[in-house]
Image (cartoon, rainbow, N blue to C red):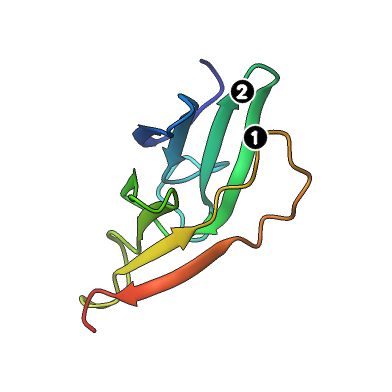
Amino acid sequence: MTGLTTVLGVAFDAEGYMYILENTTGNPFPTPFTGKVLRVTDNGLEEIATGLFLPTALTFGPDGALYVSNVGFGPPPVGLGQIVRITVPPVGSSEGLDRAKLVFNIND
């Protein structure tokens, strides 16, 4: 796999597809709101979520959703960390990228 930047993690869904977490894309230094989650398919990479704020980890929950730690580090004050729940669309879906939902703030 080539063309990736700042990969911080990978996870596999129940069907065996690999998901890649990129902390920053398109910039040489950590940049808020440029993180993304990609899925590897037979046709290449699919964007699953974009606009993440310096994400640091991902995992699948027992509900099949993808959970991402967002605001994992960087300029905001301590305590702004989040866990974001992402509903994963079917492979090859043309759905928009508006699938991420804040589950809770770390300080809640």
95 displayed left or right of 77: right
Q: Amino acid at mark 1?
A: Glu
Q: CA distance from mark 1 to mark 2?
A: 7 Å
Ranked by sequence position, the earlier of labels 1 and 2 is 2
Give the quarter of the figure containing the C terminus.
bottom left
**Residue 98 % position (x, y):** 65, 62
The quarter of the picture where residue 103 lies is bottom left
**Residue 64 % position (x, y):** 43, 48
Q: Residues within 10 Å of mark 1 (few under 14, many from 20)?
A: some
**Residue 48 % position (x, y):** 59, 45
Q: Is residue 11 above or below residue 2?
A: below
Tell me what residue is drawn at x 47 percent, y 40 percent. Answer: 28
Q: Are marks 1 and 2 in contact (CB under 8 Å)?
A: yes
The disc label shown at residue 46, or none: 1
Nearer to us in this view, 10 or 5: 10
| Secondary structure beneath label 1 | strand
Q: Residues within 10 Å of mark 2 (few under 14, many from 20)?
A: some
For disc 2, the marked residue is 41
Tell me what residue is drawn at x 79 percent, y 45 percent. Answer: 94
70 displayed left or right of 78: right
